[in-house]
Image (cartoon, rainbow, N blue to C red):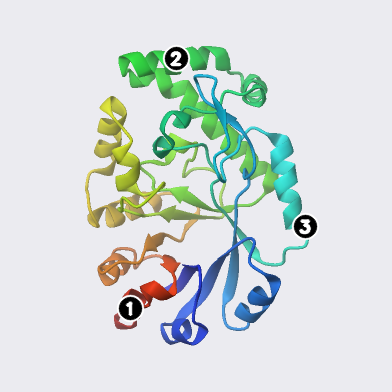
Amino acid sequence: MKLGVFVVDFDVEFLLELGIEGLILPFETHEHILKEAEKDFEIFLEFRPFDGGVIENVFGRKTRIRSLGCASDEGLWKRNFSKLEDVEYEIILDFVRFPSPANGNFFYSCFCEKCHKKARDFGYNLRVIRENVKDYLKTDDLVLLEDWFHFRQNVINEYIDWSELRKAFFFTPSLSFLVGQRYDFNMKCICPMLYPETVGPACIGYELAYMTGTLKHVVLENLGSSGDEVIGTEFKKALKSKAKIEPIIMISDNILRRLEMVKKAKRVFIFAYSNDKKGLFAKIKEF
């Protein structure tokens, strides 16, 4: 198994001692840092394709969510994609999705004019979908969200096909449908975010905390387990994809157990290395 890390700051010698071979770095990382890092590691850059846009929720409210502009905005696609023109490192898509339950009422997005046009292209009537979403919020009838979920998946799949960027961070399999992601997309590599934690968006515990009613019940049934055990069960689901699966897990006191649960992966990324986590990363020497 190859090991990589998603790093904020790092000690080269320390990571080499641990047998780390790959680094995921933020897209904005200075070139001199990249050049220095590439001497010892395979470098991947995290790229956020919908960064900088505006979304409109089901109630007509508009906002900017960091990294999550309107996924239907083809102008936004092109503006962000242009940043890749001279990039020589492998790209991993991040935030290639719609908002999640952790975004509160903006989970129920996007219903802007660009989304209306995109929906027509796919044969959907977004006005009808909008009314269905509003009815769902009154009735808790999950059937009313089916077309909405399918529309979002079509948008994300179209972006991936358009960009031809086929390596991405995805929500864990049991939650991916919520944000427009599917494990049967035409991907080269999917990095499932297998995060049981409650520390922020994309983390299973955190997303569940923002769900209620039937939706939460369905997701809990999909998961079928809790705590660290969910890493193993969700990894097995991810392996059903035709894409190569390179999971990303969070550093923790139980990192050895977590690595054991995904040991069939050819590469595993660990999130996130910073100097204050150095003691936890040191445990990897025992794996």
- Name the kind of residue labelled 2 in the image: Asn
**Point 32% across, 33% down: residue:** 211
Distance, label 2 to label 3, CA atoms, is 41 Å
* 199 left or right of 155 in image: left
Q: Residues within 10 Å of mark 3 (few under 14, many from 20)?
A: few
Residue tagged 3: 85
Residue 12: tell me if it is visible.
yes
Residue tagged 1: 279
**Point 64% across, 61% down: residue:** 28
| 92 to 4, vertically: above or below | above
- Name the kind of residue labelled 1 in the image: Gly
Which is more toward the observer, 222 or 28?
28
- Name the kind of residue labelled 3 in the image: Glu
Callout 1 touching callout 2 (CB < 8 Å): no
Tell which circle, 2 or 3, labels the residue nearer the N-terminal end: 3
* 227 left or right of 5 in image: left
Number of the front mark, 1 or 2 = 1
Residue 242: tell me if it is visible.
no
Callout 3 touching callout 1 (CB < 8 Å): no
Percent position (x, y) of residue 106?
47, 31
**Point 32% across, 14% down: residue:** 139
Residue tagged 2: 132
Distance, label 3 to label 1, CA atoms, is 38 Å
Which element carries disc 2, helix, strand or loop?
Answer: helix
Which disc, if any, is residue 218? Answer: none
